[in-house]
Amino acid sequence: MENNKRYKEFWMDEEQDKKLSVWQEKIKDLFGEYGLYTYSFIPNGIGVEVKVFSHLTKTVLDLTDESKW
């Protein structure tokens, strides 16, 4: 039987990772926990939008860096 699985890999650069860490630490300071997150990587033809949704705070951090498109 042939394995037909397809994998996609998405990444954040160092600057995006730092911004995410700062945001998560602020959430932990306010709520006492990090909570759960949904990561969205949305290709739009010229680049990839990167957004993180906090289920605890119901807020979105937009990490998209249009200068790298």
Image (tube, grey):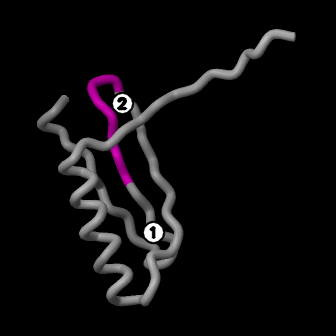
Q: Nearer the viewer, mark 2 or mark 1?
A: 1
Q: Secondary structure at mark 1?
A: strand
Magenta stretch, residue numbers:
45-51
Give the quarter of the figure containing the C terminus: top left
Residue 62 drawn at (x, y percent): 29, 55
The disc placed on residue 44 is 2
In this picture, residue 67 sits left or right of residue 13: left
Cα separation, mark 2 vs mark 1, equals 23 Å
Dot 2 alpha-carbon crowd within 10 angstroms: few under 14, some 14 to 19, many 20 or more: few
In this picture, residue 55 sits left or right of residue 21: right
Q: Secondary structure at mark 2?
A: loop
Above or below residue 9? Residue 58 is below
Query: In the depicted view, which residue is nearer to us: 68 or 15?
Result: 15
Q: Amino acid at mark 2?
A: Asn
Residue located at (22% from left, 47% from top): 14
Q: Is residue 39 magenta?
A: no
Residue 13 drawn at (x, y percent): 25, 42
Residue linked to disc 1: 54
The answer to whether marks 2 and 1 mark residues whose Cβ atoms lie closer than 8 Å is: no
Which mark sits nearer the N-terminus, 2 or 1? 2
Q: Amino acid at mark 1?
A: Ser
